[in-house]
């Protein structure tokens, strides 16, 4: 079972966030470089930012119906 992902960790720079092992920087098991926490990349409001991208837009679209052009003459 995967560990619960911390939303706001106290010291995110001390842990690799690349998988569910959460290895210390000095003893990484699965990679040779550290993966940063999303709060380090996107800021403290990273979780709200992602939800805004998935929310449907509130604007409604109205179908465009062409109007009859009275200046045209039939031939």
Image (cartoon, grey):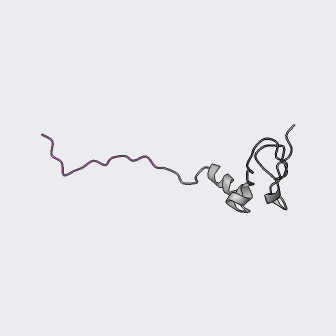
Along the viewing direction, whichever of 54 and 27 lies nearer the viewer: 27
In the rendering, at what x and y percent does residue 53 appear?
Answer: 62, 52
The image quarter containing residue 31 is top right
In the rendering, at what x and y percent does residue 5 appear?
Answer: 82, 49
Question: Where's the N terminus, which quadrant?
Answer: top right
Q: What span is colored magenta in the figure?
A: 62-75
Q: Image height check: is 36 above or below 75?
A: below
> Residue at coordinates 37% horizontally, 46% vertically from top-left?
65
Residue furthest toward the left? 75
Along the viewing direction, whichever of 43 and 23 lies nearer the viewer: 23
In the rendering, at what x and y percent does residue 6 appear?
Answer: 83, 53
In the rendering, at what x and y percent does residue 37 appear?
Answer: 75, 54
Q: Is residue 75 left or right of residue 63?
A: left
Q: Is residue 60 left or right of residue 22?
A: left
The answer to whether residue 8 shows anywhere in this view is: no
Q: Is residue 72 left or right of residue 68?
A: left
> Residue at coordinates 43% horizontally, 46% vertically from top-left?
63
Question: Where's the C terminus, which quadrant?
Answer: top left
Count of number-bearing discs: 0
Along the viewing direction, whichever of 30 and 75 lies nearer the viewer: 30
Q: Is residue 14 magenta?
A: no
Residue furthest toward the top? 1
> Residue at coordinates 27% horizontally, 47% vertically from top-left?
68
- Helix, strand or loop for the magenta stretch, by majority: loop
Along the viewing direction, whichever of 36 and 74 lies nearer the viewer: 36
The answer to whether residue 46 shows anywhere in this view is: yes
Q: Image height check: is 70 above or below 44?
A: above
């Amino acid at each position: 079972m995967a560990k619960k992902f911390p939303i706001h960790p106290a010291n995110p720079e001390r842990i690799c966030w690349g998988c569910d092992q959460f290895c210390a920087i000095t003893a990484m098991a699965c990679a040779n470089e550290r993966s940063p926490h999303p709060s380090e990349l996107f800021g403290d409001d990273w979780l709200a930012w992602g939800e805004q991208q998935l929310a449907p837009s509130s604007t409604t679209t109205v179908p465009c119906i062409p109007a009859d052009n009275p200046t045209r003459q039939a031939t």
